[in-house]
Amino acid sequence: MTGDLSPIDKAKYVAAKRAADMVEDGMRVGLGTGSTAAWLVRHLGDRVRDEGLRIKGVPTSTRTAQLARQVGIEVITLVLRV
């Protein structure tokens, strides 16, 4: 998978994979926007599918929300109380 990536994109891929490996069952996870966040969402989706990881994702964009749903991550929003 990483063979076709530029050195910068390989670094993003690895950073996202390491971040995904830190996520634990039951967590609420902020899902950012951009290429590294997209890699993170894909890696988390792999873990949801392959390991049965149960998480809830809080996306920062509709594009990220769409990708998260496609890979099997439950998407939620945060309700802030003031």
Image: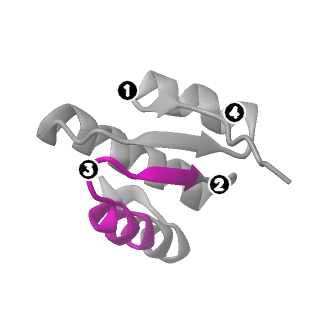
Q: Name the residue under label 4.
A: 63
Q: Is mark 4 on a helix, strand or loop?
A: helix
Spatial distance from mark 3 to mark 4, Cα to Cα?
24 Å
The residue under label 2 is 32
On residue 25, which mark appears? 3
Query: What secondary structure is found at the residue carrying circle 3?
Result: loop
Return the x and y of residue 27 as percentages of the image width and height: 39, 52
The residue beneath circle 1 is: 72
Residue 12: where, in percent of width, then height? Answer: 50, 69
Disc number at residue 21?
A: none
Q: Residue at coordinates 61% horizontally, 55% vertically from top-left?
A: 35
Q: Earlier in the sequence, mark 2 or mark 4?
A: 2
In space, the residues marked 1 and 2 are separated at their CA atoms by 17 Å
C-alpha span from label 2 to label 4:
10 Å
Identify the amino acid type marked 3: Asp
Quick check: 2 above or below 63?
below
Q: Is residue 35 above or below residue 53?
A: below
Q: In this view, does 82 lie above or below 54?
A: below
Of helix, strand and loop, which one carries label 2?
A: loop
- N-term-proximal mark, 1 vs 4: 4
